[in-house]
Image: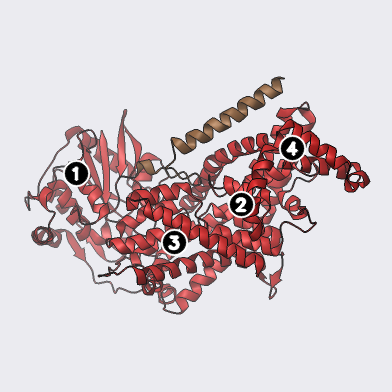
Amino acid sequence: MIQALIVSMLVLASIGFLVWKFFFRKKACNSCAINTKTIPE
Amino acid sequence: MKIALFGNPNTGKSTVFNLLTGLRQKIGNFPGVTVEQKSGVLHIKDASHELIDVPGVYSIYPSNREEKVVFDLLFNATESDKPQLGILVADASNLSRSLFFFSQLIDSGLPMVLVINMYDIAKKKGINIDVTALQSTFSQSPIVIMNARVGLGKERLMQAISEQLDALKVESTKVTNTLKKLSDLAGQEKEANARNTYLGTILNKVLQVKEVPVRTHPLDRWFTHPIAGYVIFASILFIIFQFVFSFAAFPMDAIELGFEWLTLWLRDILPDGPLSALICEGILPGISGVLVFIPQIGILFFFIALLEDSGYLARAVFLMDRLVRPFGLNGRSVVPLLSSMACAIPGVMATRGIPNYKERLITIFVAPLMSCSARIPVFTLLIGLVIPKMKLLGFIQLQGLVLLGLYLLGIVSALFIAWVMKLMINQEKRSYYLMEIPEFKRPLWRNIFLTVFEKIKVFTTEAGGIILAISIVLWALASYGPREQRRAAIQALKTTDTYMQGSTEEQDGLKNSVLLENSYIGIVGKGIEPMIKPIGYDWKIGIALITSFAAREVFVGSLSTIYANGGSDNDFKLSSKLKQQKNPDGTLVFTLRSGISLMVFYVYAMQCLSTLAIVKRETKSWKWPLLQVLFFGLMAYAGAWICFNI
């Protein structure tokens, strides 16, 4: 039961992390960490 | 306070930046490396100041995009963004050019500190600078002699910055007070003439140049030779790719063995249940499948950093300039395209230095075809899987040769598409690229190892974070599914001859495989299978292809997680697990044809969402990124189909 709870939380946290990565940091390259927000327009 | 770091390209500005802030800004030995405006914290006495590294330019006339950044920072920035102090890093061997920019900066009203860098090289060239005379001319701006590469002069510079921060003294050359309005060429020319006349009298006083015969480095005769130069360049690339495979084998095996041991150990100590399954079948295979490529990435970047730091890469840029011109690419396109081999994003950003819009557009369009570092794990996994470990002529590793071939395929395709675009887009004028070939330098091992360390760190933290998250989600989708459907599938399996005649281990393998096919991910995968079957992929590869839109290397982690779920539990090594995978008709999934088809797919497919966002931003339209998705997607599919079917 506890294991199932931990797993569910980990899965939810991973989904949350991916959503954050793509919708809130979507302009940064996921492979090399270049954050294009720091590049002047 | 805000302090801006200015300088001409290639004067060691980024080295000074790193020295002052302790940051590891990428240092290039050719212009155009600083595309991002980076900032770091500079601690002086007990106060912290923000140090901004500004792109390298020659003047503050806003005639190209990099100069516009500097112009806007000085004249159009809001009070909170404006720097209160400027530091100009000058190359001692080209003092006149640096003083031109420096004198413009002091005329903009900014308190300044002048750093004369690389004085040791200037002295070897017979150049002597009378610093006392120069200081009396620019009496309000402290002047510091430095050799930033070896950290010499750091304390003096900190002292000078501190003094200038306390006083914030400004001065003026009185050449002009119209810098802010110099947007037209005629005005700029007039201002430049007046400034050069003013600087001429100063330089006469402070510069003594002994006639030292200028000799081209003997190596340059070969490195930049119209024929030998290309042969040497190709040989260097060839040797690097050979090393990537031969040197990395031992550490890669060690990492795989380590993860195997860890998985077995955790299986022993953790109680059976979903958490243990998630860790041993989801997280660990996903992470190990990617971490195993660290040695190869490290070796590749070690050699690239070595070439860059020694000054060879600048010669390669010079050679490439000649090569790309017939294809409609400007010589200025070479730096962006070379940058794209690390990542297409800085490559696309670096096209800002190309003044001709159409040439810039062509470069942006073809930049994603240069194989970026995210493709390395995908290529090396597939090469290890389908290309035999054999030597040609007794010393050429076939696997290394194929990797070189994949890079060349990207380059040749980029040149071909550029040439087609050149024919389609009518260019009324061509621009030319002037570059300064730097001296050969003894590589600084610290710089090289920092670059490699930084690359590996970013690979494990950035891509690793996404891979970890995707592995967890994929594991959940692969472990659960519609209960009734799974039960019915298992019942059906148990009635088959293969199941009944199999050993216990084989029966477990078959059960796992059926459960996976009837999991949520299996149902989605089966849905897309008809689309990818013609190019030789099964539904599991299809899922990995979709997840690699997050970052290309996720492909490897995804395959690892998906295959850890189905099949037997006793094989930990991803490559041997993949080698055994079979289609329902009994044929192998990973054959030479399907492997090459996948590699070609990855050479062309426009899978990087971040690059698309940047292309949209740089071209200010969705037209070009959409064209890239469609066109490169079509090329990838057609190329993969040809490789699989012919």
In the picture of the structure, the residue carrying the numbered disc 3 is B310
**Which mark's residue is nearer the viewer, 4 or 3?**
4
Q: Is residue B228 above or below residue B188?
A: below
Q: CA distance from mark 1 to mark 2?
A: 44 Å
In the picture of the structure, the residue carrying the numbered disc 2 is B295
Q: Residue at x 63, y 55 (%)?
A: B532
In the picture of the structure, the residue carrying the numbered disc 1 is B74
Q: Does label 1 lie on the same chain as label 4?
A: yes
Identify residue type, mark 2.
Pro
Q: Quadrant of the N terminus of chain B?
A: top left
Q: Does label 4 lie on the same chain as label 2?
A: yes
Q: Quadrant of the C terminus of chain B?
A: bottom right
Rendered red, the chain in question is B
Q: In the structure shown, which secondary structural element does the residue marked by tag 1 occupy? A: helix
Give whichever of discs 2 and 4 has the lower sequence position.
4
Q: Does label 3 lie on the same chain as label 4?
A: yes
Identify residue type, mark 3.
Ser
**Which mark's residue is nearer the viewer, 3 or 1?**
1
Colour of the chain lettered A = brown
Q: Position of residue B616 (x, y in %)?
A: 37, 50
**Which mark's residue is nearer the viewer, 1 or 2?**
1
Q: Position of residue B225 (x, y in %)?
A: 42, 77
Determine if residue B143 is in view. Answer: no
In the picture of the structure, the residue carrying the numbered disc 4 is B263
